[in-house]
Amino acid sequence: MTITLSAHFVLIHGAGYGGWCWYKIRCLLESTGQKVSCPDLSCSGIDLTDVDTIRSFQDYNKPLDDILASLPEGEKVILVGHSAGGLSVTKAIQNFPDKIQVGVFIGAVMLRNGFQTEQDRKDGTPDLSVNSEVSNNVNPPPSAIYNKEDQRKISCQMSPLEVHSYQTC
């Protein structure tokens, strides 16, 4: 007899990425019958939100918050964050504690004691001082556009090239 346990995974990308970066994990999980959501946070991936309209971290997290708010009563998700996605996981756990079964941080920003203050966010912000276009908007979060060579040097030096393209199952 085979017992299949089904879960809903919500995979949160890091800075400079989108939901596409989870394509291999998504395919593997879905092939075992799991439900998987890989949202593009505001201004990320293929989300067309204008960066100048984002005034707060809550605005940035809106796609994740929308998924969690729309869950049926009693449904819980396994929330997984990578890199700066750890900040989104922390905030979601604070905002939707009854909707999260477990939070998983994979090479992700983890805040002391789970708190998220302005100083915590500053301490967790990566160094963006490479030869790429960086926007230091007065309204956080700042944005950065990396050319492919810089992106690979900063965070993907050991990843195969197909990780950087929009792939699906």
Image (cartoon, helix red, strand yellow):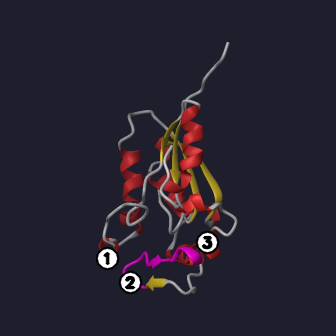
Q: Residue furthest right?
A: 158
Q: Looking at the image, which residue is at 31% across and 71% down? A: 50
| Percent coordinates x, y for residue 22 in the rendering | 55, 52
- Residue 34 visible at all: yes
Is residue 119 in the magenta section? no
- For label 1, the crowd category at 10 Å Cα-Cα, with few meaning under 14, some 14 to 19 and many 20 or more, is some
| Percent coordinates x, y for residue 70 in the rendering | 35, 42
In the image, which disc is placed on residue 52? Answer: 1
The amino acid at mark 1 is Asp
Which residue position holds label 2? 137
Which residue position holds label 3? 152
Q: Earlier in the sequence, mark 2 or mark 1?
A: 1
Q: Which residues are magenta?
A: 136-149
| Percent coordinates x, y for residue 131 in the rendering | 55, 87
Q: Residue furthest front?
A: 161
The amino acid at mark 2 is Asn
Q: Quadrant of residue 109?
A: bottom right
Camera-side residue: 6 or 72?
6
Q: CA distance from mark 1 to mark 3?
A: 26 Å
